[in-house]
Amino acid sequence: DIAMFDDGTGWAVGDGFDIFYFDGKDWIRKRVIMAGLYGYEMHGIAALGQDNVWFVGDHNLQTHWNGSLLQDSGGGRRDNVFGDDGNSSGFSSISVTTDGHGWAAGPEGPPAVRQRGKWYDSSSVPLGNTMQSVLMRSESDVWFGSGLISDGKSKTPIVRGDGFTWTSMSSGSHLPIMQLSEGPQDTLWAVGSSHAVQGRPLQSAILSFVNNEAWQVDLQLTDQGLTSIAWSESAGTWAGGSKLLHLDGTNWQVVNGVLENEFVKDIDLPADGR
C-alpha cells in the first residue's frame, strides 16, 4: 500500500511489518515493532496527514500513526476490536475521512465501519463478505470493490453507497478489484488483478469511472500483479504491486528505486494533502 501527500512525501507498506516513508526524494525503510505484534503484515493505508495515518493488516490488525508512534487501536485483533470473530484473515483496505468516520474491507469477512470513535462489523453492504477494497469519499459516497473470482465471462461488481441505499454496478473487468481511489476532476480509479488467484494467468487492469458514467478498462497488463492505485493533485496517479508505476500524462512509466524489490500492496494519495 502507498499513501502520498500533496507536498510530495508519502508512506508505503510491503511484505512483512516494514513501513516505508518517502521524503520527497528517497524511499526510507522504517521498521516499527509493536509489543506482541511482530511478524504481522500490513496491507492497507489511509493517510489524512503526517500525524494521522491508519493501517490495516493480518488478523484484522488496525493501527494508527500519530506522528511519532504506531499504536494499536483497541487491541489490534478482530475479537478485541471489531466483534467476536477472531478467525478472519484480516483487512486488506481502509478508508477514513477527516471527521474520523471510516470503512475497512477484507474478502473473508464483513466490512467494518468506524463511528463515534469505534470500529464495528457491518452487515449492510451487499456481497459484503467478498469486498476487497473500499473508498470513502464522504458518509454519503462510499465505494466497495469485490474480490470475487470471476468465471471470465461475468464482470466483477463494484458497490456504491449513498448513506441510505447500496447500488451494484459492473467494473468492466473480470478481475478482483484490489483498490479504489480518487482521481482528477470527476474521475475515480480502480485496479484489478488475478495475482492472488491460483491457477489463473497473471493479469492486471487499471480502470476509470469518469463523469458519473460507467467503469471502463484503461490499461490491461499481462505478467504484472498490480494491486494498488492512488492520485493526488501534485503527485499525479500511481499504481503499485510487483512494479511501481506512475502516469506521465497519458503513459504509464515504471519507477525504479527502493521499492523495486518489494511488493507494494496498496496506494493512497489524499487529494487535499491532509
Image (cartoon, rainbow, N blue to C red):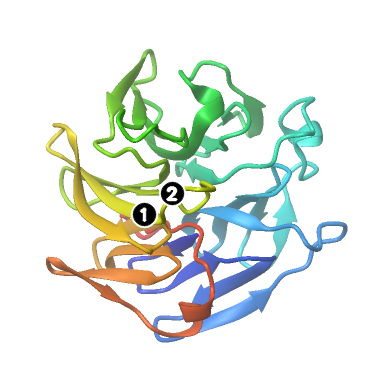
Residue type of the residue flagged with mark 1: Gln
Number of marks in the rendered image: 2
Q: Quadrant of residue 250?
A: bottom left
Q: Residue at x 75, y 26 (%)?
A: 83
Q: Relative to 262, is 221 on the left or the right?
A: left
Q: Relative to 84, is 153 on the left or the right?
A: left
- Front-lying residue, 240 or 4: 240
Q: Residue at x 43, y 60 (%)?
A: 225
Q: Which residue is mark 2?
A: 194
- Front-lying residue, 63 or 50: 63
Q: Are marks 2 and 1 in contact (CB under 8 Å)?
A: yes
Res. 43 visible in picture: yes
The furthest residue to the top: 164
Residue type of the residue flagged with mark 2: Ser
Q: Residue at x 64, y 24 (%)?
A: 121
Question: SS of the residue at dot 1?
Answer: strand
Q: Is residue 232 above or below residue 137?
A: below
Q: Residue at x 43, y 49 (%)?
A: 194
Query: Disc 2 or 1, which lies upstream in sequence?
Result: 2
Res. 141 visible in picture: no
Q: Residue 8: horizontal and vertical position, in percent?
A: 36, 74
Q: Which residue is mark 1?
A: 203
Question: SS of the residue at dot 2?
Answer: loop
Q: Residues within 10 Å of mark 2 (few under 14, many from 20)?
A: many
Q: Quadrant of residue 174?
A: top left
Q: Residue 125: horizontal and vertical position, in percent?
A: 48, 20
Q: CA distance from mark 2 to mark 1?
A: 6 Å
